[in-house]
Amino acid sequence: MSTRILVIEDEEPLRLALCDALRDEGFEVSEAADGEEGLKHALSDAPEVVLLDLMLPKRDGFSVLRAMREDRLSSAVIILSARGEEWDRVQGFEFGADDYVVKPFSMRELLMRIRALLRRADGETPGMALEGGKLRFGEVIVDFAAYSLECAGVRHGLSRRELELLRFFLSNEGKTLERSTILDQVWGREEDPTPRTVDMHVLKLRKKIEADPEAPRHIQTVHGVGYRFSRKGESVR
Ligand code: CA
């Protein structure tokens, strides 16, 4: 049986283009043009993947997502949004989204993310949204609202910057991230940090999320470039 994907998007040309491209890739695709209809399809079909727009008629994307999770629907959810602000990323993960793409995105990028999610769903320890705005990956449970995390039963506070850095890693899993990209995205241009600032914060995060900070499995160093994040925790050997 082929993988089922539900596309909830009110912009018709985009919805049709997505559906066509996904069908070409061999997925079984269903679609909805508003939030009510989308939620109904999600609950009745339990698709493996849901592509969810945020600004939707009748019921917005966050409300659809929350209702899906309240109903214990475990579909992987990728949020599609024109709004690229931090607020959305935070809310998306707090409400249990698995990934996030900002419009306009390329079909190739979206397909890569869908495949990554499906691979992750096959693994033993996928990143998992928990109740109360928490997110689990590996041994770590992040509490975004409380600026803290728990790793192997030990609780650690997080500075705002550490939390933002971790959030950035989570939303860019598997990508090699240059220090300059991390600086732009997490620190912004109004401040004057140096690439060393990133390294310092990575060190602090590693002490909180890695079983052995000297042999990190989640935040890996890509020598001469930057870092790459893995929720599952890749072996360094
Ligand atoms: Ca929309």
Image: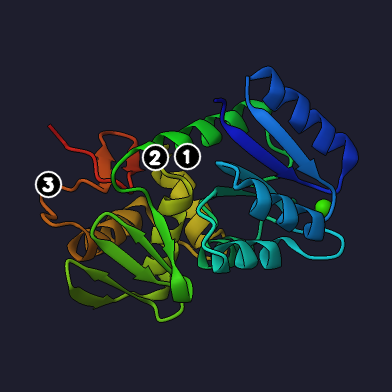
Residue 100 at least partly seen: no
Mark 2, ligand 1, within 8 Å: the answer is no
Q: Position of residue 112 (x, y in %)?
A: 53, 30
At x 87% / y 60%, what residue is drawn? Answer: 57
Q: Amino acid at mark 3?
A: Ala
Residue picked out by circle 3: 215
Q: Are marks 2 and 1 in contact (CB under 8 Å)?
A: yes
Q: Position of residue 141 (x, y in %)?
A: 31, 67
For marks 1 and 3, give the one nearer the viewer: 1
Q: CA distance from mark 2 to mark 1?
A: 5 Å
Quadrant, the C terminus: top left
> Which badge, 2 or 3, comes first in the chain's sequence?
2
Q: In the structure shown, which secondary structural element does the residue marked by tag 1 occupy?
A: helix
Q: Residues within 10 Å of mark 2 (few under 14, many from 20)?
A: some
Residue picked out by circle 1: 117
Q: Amino acid at mark 2?
A: Arg
Q: Position of residue 167 (x, y in %)?
A: 44, 59
- Give the left or right position of residue 226, taking residue 109 as reference: left
Closer to the camera, 48 or 8? 48
Label of residue 120 in the image: 2
> Which badge, 1 or 3, comes first in the chain's sequence?
1
Q: Are marks 2 and 3 in contact (CB under 8 Å)?
A: no
Closer to the camera, 73 or 103? 73
Given the current orientation, which residue lies at the most extreme bottom position? Answer: 146
Q: CA distance from mark 1 to mark 3?
A: 26 Å
